[in-house]
Image (spheres, grey):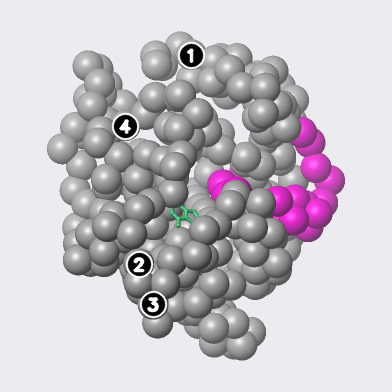
């Protein structure tokens, strides 16, 4: 990744009308209905944006959408890049750097995740308060990182406190029950074994998924305030573990998404 590449990606998007987005939004697996709320949208397919990671066949629908939600300009990533698809840490976080250079002031991230904390149920939403990086690498471990910001990024409060408080207030007002906890990121794509779920619980995780943490690290690198929520799609109870497949995860995520949309819309309105 070079500054010149970032400039070219951003120039392409500016020329297409991605003028002044205030918020960036990343939509997780099974979470695409928020796109229907975008007014006056302009679409850029990932495959057409210079230097964007080249999409795999199954990922051809990935797109960046610019438009208005609740009267504010947003840029939405419909579909994200994952390590398990064979991309590296720089690839999967490149879109965050592009959105930042487009001018976003805040970043909202969503994902589908498994519930490690068994007080949480599938279909719940969890506000991420902190994370554990179990992906075995960092999006900041590259040679010229200091050209893009500080190398030794502070991670004492990676998820913006003010925005988290806003999300909690909105959830209360809208009657959306909201869990809070620690998200652990793994590479995947296989789901976890019973022994791994026990380990994750011991480590202090409340939820587990295959994304988000690299993007949050880069947001912190860019000093871009970020908030993230997990849609809990399955209960990871090692003593009563039921087989689960990705279709089920996607189905539960999309059933739960309206609650997430309420929170994000509220946050856009209130910010
Ligand atoms: N593990 C990892 N990722 C997930 C899970 C899970 O149980 N559910 C949804 N994404």
Q: Which of marks 1 and 2 is nearer the N terminus?
A: 1
**Callout 3 secondary element:** loop
In the rendered image, the vertical position of residue 105 relative to residue 14, given as above or below = below
Other residues around mark 4 within 10 Å, as few (<14) / some (14–19) / many (≥20):
many
Residue beneath disc 2 = 238
| Labels 2 and 3 touching (C-beta < 8 A) | no
Q: How far apart are marks 2 and 4 (CA)?
A: 31 Å
Residue 139's label in the rendered image is 4
Q: Distance between the residues labelled 4 and 3?
A: 31 Å
Image point (56%, 79%), residue name: 170
* Range shown magenta: 18-43
Image point (72%, 63%), residue name: 70
Q: Which of 62 and 234 is in front in this view?
A: 234
Relative placement, left or right, of 201 versus 163 is left
**Callout 4 secondary element:** loop
Q: Which of marks 2 and 4 is nearer the N terminus?
A: 4
């Amino acid at each position: 990744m070079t500054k010149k590449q970032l400039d070219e990606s951003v120039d392409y998007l500016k020329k297409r009308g991605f003028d002044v987005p205030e918020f960036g939004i990343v939509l997780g697996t099974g979470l695409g209905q928020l796109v229907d709320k975008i007014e006056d949208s302009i679409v850029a397919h990932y495959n057409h944006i210079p230097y964007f990671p080249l999409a795999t066949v199954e990922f051809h629908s990935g797109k960046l959408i610019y438009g208005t939600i609740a009267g504010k300009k947003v840029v939405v990533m419909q579909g994200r890049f994952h390590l398990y698809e064979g991309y590296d840490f720089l690839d999967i976080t490149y879109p965050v750097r592009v959105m930042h250079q487009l001018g976003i002031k805040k970043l909202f991230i969503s994902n589908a995740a498994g519930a490690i904390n068994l007080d949480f149920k599938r279909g719940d939403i969890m506000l991420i308060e902190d994370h554990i990086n179990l992906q075995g690498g960092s999006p900041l471990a590259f040679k010229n990182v200091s050209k893009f910001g500080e190398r030794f990024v502070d991670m004492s409060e990676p998820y913006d406190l003010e925005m988290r408080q806003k999300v909690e207030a909105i959830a209360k007002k809208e009657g959306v029950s909201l869990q809070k906890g620690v998200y652990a990121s793994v590479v995947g794509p296989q789901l976890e074994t019973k022994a791994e779920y026990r380990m994750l619980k011991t480590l202090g995780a409340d939820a587990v998924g295959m994304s988000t943490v690299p993007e949050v690290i880069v947001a912190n690198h860019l000093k871009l305030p970020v908030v993230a929520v997990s849609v809990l799609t399955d209960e990871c109870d090692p003593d009563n573990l039921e087989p689960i497949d990705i279709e089920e995860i996607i189905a539960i995520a999309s059933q739960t998404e309206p609650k997430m949309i309420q929170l994000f819309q509220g946050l856009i309105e209130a910010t």
